[in-house]
Structure formats: structure tokens, C-alpha cells
Amino acid sequence: MSEWVQSVDWPSMWLSTGQTLYMTAISGVFTFFLGIALGLLLYLTAKGGLYENPIIYKLIASFVNVFRSIPFIILIILLIPFTVLILGTMIGATAALPSIIIGAAPFYARLVEIGLREVDKGVIEAAQAMGATRLQIIWKVLLPESLPSVSSGMTVALIALIGNTAMAGVVGAGGLGTIAYNEGFEANNNTITFIATIIILIIVFFIQYIGDRITRHVDKR
């Protein structure tokens, strides 16, 4: 057992864990706000929406569908010129953020759109009958009523982000993906790969637990 523990470079393991948490937290914040914005635009500009506009809807839907469909490992490679342009490098945890965010936000946007479509039409019609403006309907009806679905969707998105950070590690982003690949797989040290996997599972279970608690808290139904 002691030899098993000693075969792991624990300072590097904890550093990699911190990098994974950093990438997940920062990309999670941007994914949340961008996903909410894109999801709202998709819902509002769709047929029958408060701001129905077929042209804008098709443009946003096309953007979301394209970036949601590209495999993440390919997306990282495609966005290397963009990443270098805005950050000056393609290596490191921060350099992985643009790809992670652009890959996750469209996915979360669809979850937000689905949540908004689940809002009872009768509630919206009642608000309109009471003279509420479209902005008031958005802020006081749509978003509050869809909050359980939006919260649950964010939990799913965060767990997907964990997987994306691991894949980004293969191309030098750092984090548990890098240490599992470089010091585990390439060095034929299965112990490191196993421990990195266990740490990722712990993070995922924690996110799922917190996400479930928040969803139950905001669900007033």
C-alpha cells in the first residue's frame, strides 16, 4: 500500500486537481450566462415567441447547432488560432477556457430553451392579460418559472465541463486530464490514472449533489 501511494507525485496531483477546478469554475460561470442569453434568444425569437423573428432565430439556432455538434477534441484544434489571438498561447489551463466555453454554452443554451418551453402558457397569458410588458414577463414569469429546469440543466452542463477539461488536458491544458495521460498512460503508471479518475468522480458526485439540492430548493411546485 505504501509503495502504491509513494508512486504518485502528490504535489502534481493536487496542482492538477486545482487546475481542473479552476477550468470548471471559470468556464461554468461563462457557460451559465452565455447559455441563459442564447437560450432566451432562441425561445423569444422562435415562432410564437414574444419577439418572434425567423431570421434571428435561424442565425442563433445555426450557431448553437454547429458548435454543439463538433466533437470537443476537434473544436480545441479548430479554435487554436482564436485562442492564440486573444491569449497569446495555446498551452495551459487559461488557454483551454475559450474552447471549453464555446463548446459548452450552446449545449446549455438548448437545455435553457427546453426549460423555457416547459413554462405553462397559461401563466404567460395571465401575465399579458394583467398588462405586463414583455420584459416583465421575461424577468418575473419566464425565468422564475423555468428556474428548476435551468438549475438542473446547469448541473448537467457542469458535469459535461469536467469531461471537457479532461479532454483538453490531452493537448496540454493541464489538469487531471494531462496528468492522467502524460504521467499515467504514457508512463504506463496505472496508479496515477486510477487516482486521477477517482478524483474526477468525486468532483462529479459533489457537483451532482449540490445541483440536486439547489434544484429541489428552487422548485416550488
Image (tube, rainbow, N blue to C red):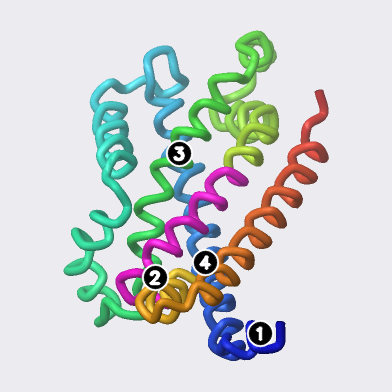
Residue displayed at 69% across by 27% down: 145
The tag earlier along the polypeptide, 4 or 3, is 4
Q: Name which residue type carries label 1.
A: Val
Q: Alpha carbon of mark 1 to alpha carbon of mark 4: how far?
A: 31 Å
Q: Alpha carbon of mark 2 to alpha carbon of mark 1: how far?
A: 23 Å
On screen, residue 81 versus residue 17, left or right, reads left
Q: Name which residue type carries label 3.
A: Ala
Q: Name which residue type carries label 4.
A: Ile
Residue labelled with disc 3: 109
Residue labelled with disc 1: 5
The tag earlier along the polypeptide, 3 or 2, is 3
Indicate whether 114 appears above or below 25.
Answer: above
**Rendered-image quadrant of the N terminus:** bottom right
Q: Residues within 10 Å of mark 1 (few under 14, many from 20)?
A: few
Can residue 164 be found in the magenta stretch?
yes
Mark 2 vs mark 1: in front: 1
| Element type where label 3 sits in the image | helix
Residue labelled with disc 2: 169
Mark 1 vs mark 3: in front: 1
Q: Are marks 1 and 4 in contact (CB under 8 Å)?
A: no
The tag earlier along the polypeptide, 4 or 2, is 4
The stretch of residues the image draws in magenta is 154-175
Q: Position of residue 88 (x, y in %)?
A: 25, 82
On screen, residue 2 versus residue 30, left or right, reads right
Q: Position of residue 191 (x, y in %)?
A: 55, 75
Q: Position of residue 46 (x, y in %)?
A: 38, 20
Residue labelled with disc 4: 26
Mark 1 vs mark 4: in front: 1
Q: Residues within 10 Å of mark 4 (few under 14, many from 20)?
A: some
